[in-house]
Image (tube, grey):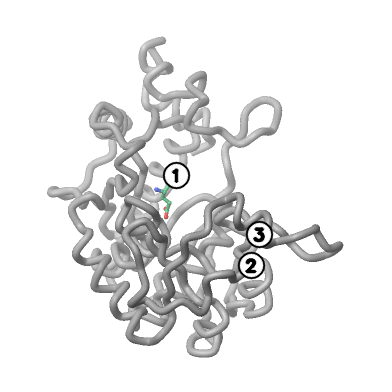
Amino acid sequence: MSYRTRFAPSPTGPLHLGHAYSAILAFDMAQAAGGTFLLRIEDIDQSRARIEWETQIFDDLQWLGLDWPSPVMRQSTRLPRYREALAQLEQLGLTYPCHCNRADIEAAAGAPQEGVPQFGPDGRIYPGTCRNRAMSQAKPSDVIRLNMEKSIQLAGHASFRETGSQFHGPHKLDPDHLTTAVGDIILVRRGMGSSYHLSVVVDDADQHISHVTRGVDLFEATQIHVLLQTLLALPTPIYHHHVLIRDDDGKRLAKRDDARAIAKYRAEGATPQDIRTMVGL
Ligand code: GLU
């Protein structure tokens, strides 16, 4: 198997030290394996994506000494492909349209019960109000959800291999966790034509990604991705979830954390080697 990995930023803010760590690590691992490092622009959320941020991403990564093949995949050009994948899930009877807004979901979720999680990787766990609606009833203003229980019946046996982090080793999906702590995730968001989960799974497969390197904050999302890969009959890559770069107070860096932006260090005269040293690479 040839080693292919990717760095997949969303152009919604400046790259900071955490992104630099993730990108350099993926690049170095690909180099060490004689493989390929790809860049993918995750810009399906057109309300937040900005071309200026995309230009800055290219510039920062090149300055760091990374290179990648052209053309670069951009999610905003791939909606027909995501629609195909959605149709496949629809044919399996796993999708339904949902008109609930946040207030509806909160009201239907009721009072919190001790020991029962209320929030999953996508926000509040969906209580299932629209679960019996048919796809033929879908309106343009609806989101499309995945019926998690039915999905687990078909693909709950799936597994994946982890080579990084504290989770090193083989992993089976955890059907109980997926039903109670993740729930009916959104496959198509309002006005977006897709979602992070659906797009990333389709793109990793279409780009023949053999190894996914990304932050340990996405470990829970990986369960969702492996489930979707299995339902869509797509291969499951090997995963490497790396530690997160934190600020001096131990908080993980966020896009709005301009203080750690690579552009800022560059403006202050730092070298690419200084950035490597700062992130421990
Ligand atoms: N666009 C995602 C992010 O910036 C990529 C996550 C992934 O590697 O799948 O967090």
Secondary structure category for the residue under label 1: helix
The residue that label 1 is drawn on is 22
Kind of residue at disc 1: Ser
Is 158 displayed left or right of 124 in the figure? left
User: Depth check: 146 or 42 in front?
Assistant: 146
Q: Is residue 280 above or below residue 131?
A: above
Is 261 displayed left or right of 83 in the figure? right
User: Residue 166 got which mark?
Assistant: 3
Q: Residue furthest right?
A: 114
| Image quadrant where residue 249 sits | top right
User: Depth check: 205 or 24 in front?
Assistant: 205
Label 3 crowd bin: few (<14), some (14–19), many (20+), radius 10 Å: few
User: Depth check: 128 or 84 in front?
Assistant: 128
Q: Earlier in the sequence, mark 1 or mark 2?
A: 1
Q: Alpha carbon of mark 1 to alpha carbon of mark 3: how far?
A: 17 Å
Image coordinates of residue 57 in percent, x first then y, are 30, 33
Q: Alpha carbon of mark 2 to alpha carbon of mark 3: how far?
A: 32 Å
Q: Earlier in the sequence, mark 1 or mark 3?
A: 1
| Image quadrant where residue 211 sits | bottom left
Kind of residue at disc 3: Gln
Kind of residue at disc 2: Pro
Q: Alpha carbon of mark 1 to alpha carbon of mark 2: how far?
A: 35 Å
The residue that label 2 is drawn on is 127
Residue at the location (44% across, 38% down)?
A: 19
Q: Residue furthest left?
A: 71
Q: Is mark 1 within 8 Å of ligand 1?
A: yes
Q: Is mark 2 within 8 Å of ligand 1?
A: no
Secondary structure category for the residue under label 3: loop
Label 1 crowd bin: few (<14), some (14–19), many (20+), radius 10 Å: many
| Image quadrant where residue 96 sits | bottom left
